[in-house]
Amino acid sequence: MSTPQPHPGAPARTREQVADLHFMDARYKLLDLAAFLDRLDRAAGGEDHRVRGLRAALPLLLEKDEGRVARILNLWSDPSVEPIAKADTKAASGVWPGLK
Amino acid sequence: MRYIEPHGHMVSRTTDDYQAMALAGCAAICEPAFWAGFDRKSADGFYDYFCQLTQIEPKRAAKYGLPHYSWLCINPKESEDMALAADVLALIPEFLKAPTVLGIGEIGLNKNTRNEMKLLEQHIALAVQYDQMILVHTPHLEDKRKGTRLIMDCLKANGVVKPERVIIDHVEEHTIHEVLDQGFWAGITLYPESKSTPVRAVDMIESVSAQRVWLNSACDWGHSDPLSVPKAAQEMRRRGHSAAAIDRLVYGNPVKFLSQSPRFKDPAAQA
């Protein structure tokens, strides 16, 4: 477990207090994710890029340093820097389609 | 508790939402122009929309004791028809005279296309010409990081825009630090699924100097929650933040930014 690094804008709190407030919320979200992966297993067809991106992000959850959300969002981001000529859709999918 | 809703698309909400927000402590609402969920076919459609924003919504809000302000633009999702965009831009100066218009917004990028960039530059030039503040929409999901950087580069390239008069909205954990580091205000949008949840927003607030940050619901016709700002305040209370810190974030900060427009009146000063 990492050394606590409290942020200057946060009231002091223990890990037990954080768990008291947010454990059940995290628990049901993890079970929902497991159920989603099971549901995918029961469905036909290949895996699309969004699910590939989700699986690629799972190891980042177990990294020890803070900043997991930003690392996942960066993983899913379009890495290019120039404007594109034209969009073929108005919507975003949640994961950059080029992610391997 | 009191708070400002600095970004809500009330044209797509019911009067029950106005009532619920007022009961939750909302003291004022600001409404940027946005995409209607479909592409409007003519400038006349935008003319009617701008009338709705500047004349109709203030009356609806007033029934619940809420001051209503607006921002004007054509959304980047409707930027591919550049001829239409030019016609709409030509309408905006007339509406900037309305007493409740705060600036140009929400402009920005959606899919980071060349035409979106051109329209963004035109909107920025319009804001500079009429000395207006700017409210920026950043792209969704995987397009956000790239789009946020392109937008900031575009704003800086203009050379005249003052970062402290620009709020870059819909920041998340991977963009908030860059936005604040470059001197802009940052908006955290609270959505049930996309963008940020109230819990993540409070995590971000705790990790930055929150002097140039506001929270908003951006409630619209999609999956969104007009009470998400007071819910974030509740999350802060659960974590032990002081009443003063909460008030500073959900009331003081938006009042500070918005008061750069002489049109905006601090509701507390009006009481």
Image: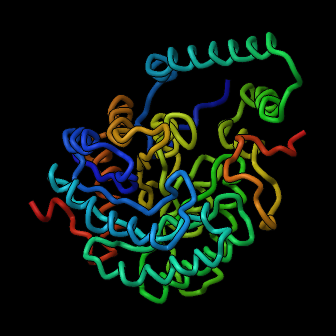
Residue at the extreme bottom: B129
Observer-nearest of B14 and B111: B14
Residue at the extreme left: B271
Compared with A56, B15 (above or below) is below
Compared with B3, A31 (above or below) is above
x and y, in percent, of residue A70 in the image: 67, 43
Image position of B79 (left or right of B222): right
Which image quarter holds the N terminus of chain B?
Answer: top left
Q: Is residue B165 visible?
A: no
Image position of B154 (left or right of B19): right
Observer-nearest of B190 and B200: B190
Q: How is the image coloured?
A: rainbow
Which image quarter holds the C terminus of chain B?
Answer: bottom left
Image position of B254 (left or right of A62): left
Observer-nearest of B218 and A58: B218
Q: Residue at x 41, y 59 (%)?
A: B211
Give the image quarter of residue A37: top right
Q: Residue at x 78, y 34 (%)?
A: A50
